[in-house]
Image (cartoon, rainbow, N blue to C red):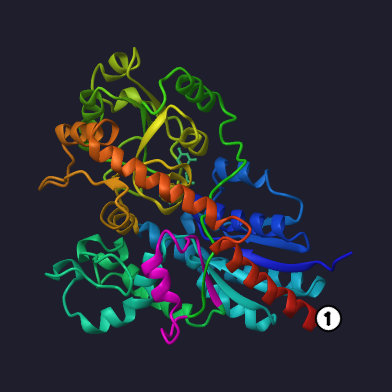
Amino acid sequence: MEKTIHFAVVPGIGYSHLIPILQFSKRLVELHKEFHVTCLIPSLGSPPSASKTFLETLPSSINCTFLPPVETKDLPQGITTEIQMQLTVTLSLPSLHQALKSLSLRTPLVALVVDSQAAEALKFAQEFNMLSYIFFPSAATTLSLHLYLPKLDKETSCEYRELPEPIKVPGCVPLHGRDLYTPAQDRSSQTYKLLLQRVKRFGCADGVLINSFLELETGPIRALTEEGSGNPPVYPVGPIIQTGTRSCDDAKGLDCLAWLDKQQPCSVLYVSFGSGGTLSQEQIVELALGLELSNHKFLWVVRAPSTSASAAYLSAQNNVDPSQFLPHGFLERITKEQGMVIPSWAPQIQILSHSSVGGFLSHCGWNSTLESVVKGMPLITWPLFAEQRMNAVLLSEGLKVGLRPRVNENGLVERVEVAEVIKCLMEGEEGGRLRKRMKELKEAATNALKENGSSIKTLSQLTLKWRNLALENN
Ligand code: UDP
């Protein structure tokens, strides 16, 4: 029997920093039966039920342990979501250290793979004689900006959003400063300083694994992996998306799939803002009336309004009552024929796989982006926070598989604009072109994961390295 090769993973905080690293682990143990994973999970309060449900689907070669949770009351008041996530990791470091110590006494560990938020934990790899990797759950474009940021920071004296020309990060679609990720929008903020600190740690890792693939982000991936670039080794291993989840166990999820069963092929627009994106009250009204005005069928995952777009990211909204914030009479009118709203959470993978769905109005979180690519679903790009605007630029200007609605001077997408962009995607010639290009990307994604595909080959290089090291250590 082959000897077990053991590695440890440390996810970041929040659903979309937990699932991809575990899904990566799952792919690895499925491809290479001798691998065994221990996942040490830092968390802020109690994890959301969607995360717990996912953990139940993992094979026995992946062991998950929650580190003692950090409580919200232990964090300073009024800090941003990013700082909450970062502090949670920092406060979990002593228990992580302890867990790694007792694990390494029981079994030799070949590698430590940490989510990019948990880069502080890389220092433990050396202590326990492991290789160290960052799992980067966002685009290669975002990683490129990360690694370019120290130089950009030195060369720029104003806020990036004030720069008259787009920023040219090597290999990437030019990005306007206003489209850079949220932490880079205010260079005097603590979030920006933390980001710069975190990025500097990337250079200490033995490699960075990215959830992307060569055919999707050819320019940035080539630039990142170019000899002499000075970057740590970069391994594109994507697309890694959720599979086999049981997120539609609940009645609401099953209802919306039953509703989709009754619709025409490619007729429904799916509308969702990720695991925790929220809109203002005013924007909810414009979106609702725009959806109605478009005359197209839709399935919308709604959340209660908030003035902060990431309000529900770390604290899931329960008991949402859409009648409290949707326009008067909207629910009665649309549920007769045109649409369905589902509060808080829907089985997204099953929805995007359904033949009735023909488009996705998305906040462009990287997981949703990859899920659209894998399912061949063209997009309306509606970014809210984090690096979503950069993903929207990649999708609409780079890959040309998404339409970006116009935002007015008050930051609102008006109802007429909503209706027009939906019509353009669902019935227009341009929509047809986007759909065709997305089908090509879908095929490229499938190929990247075939036996000789780009990402599977990259993964094999990595596992060979780990296997050799495990042999040397024996
Ligand atoms: N998701 C889901 N149902 C929902 C909303 C989100 O299953 O109602 C999943 C979605 O499939 C994706 C993840 O949550 O895998 C959201 O990740 P993403 O990176 O797109 O956005 P974030 O949550 O980080 O803003």
Q: Quadrant of the N terminus?
A: bottom right
- What residue appears at the point 27 percent right and 51 percent down from the top-left corner? 396
Report which residue position mark 1 lands on.
Answer: 474
Q: Quadrant of residue 147?
A: bottom left
Q: Nearer the viewer, residue 85 or 229?
A: 229
- Count of numbered labels shown in the rendering: 1
> Which is more toward the observer, 266 or 232?
266
Q: Is residue 157 above or below residue 431?
A: below
Q: Which residues are magenta?
A: 207-231
Question: Which residue sits at x=50%, y=35%?
Answer: 353
- 219 lies left or right of 17: left
Farthest-out residue, right? 1
Q: Position of residue 119 (x, y in %)?
A: 51, 72
Q: Is residue 166 magenta?
A: no
Q: Residue at x 52, y 28 (%)?
A: 253
Q: Amino acid at mark 1?
A: Asn
| Image quadrant in which the C terminus is located | bottom right
Q: Secondary structure at mark 1?
A: loop
State which quadrant residue 216 falls in: bottom left
Question: Where residue 149 sits: x, y (%)?
Answer: 32, 76
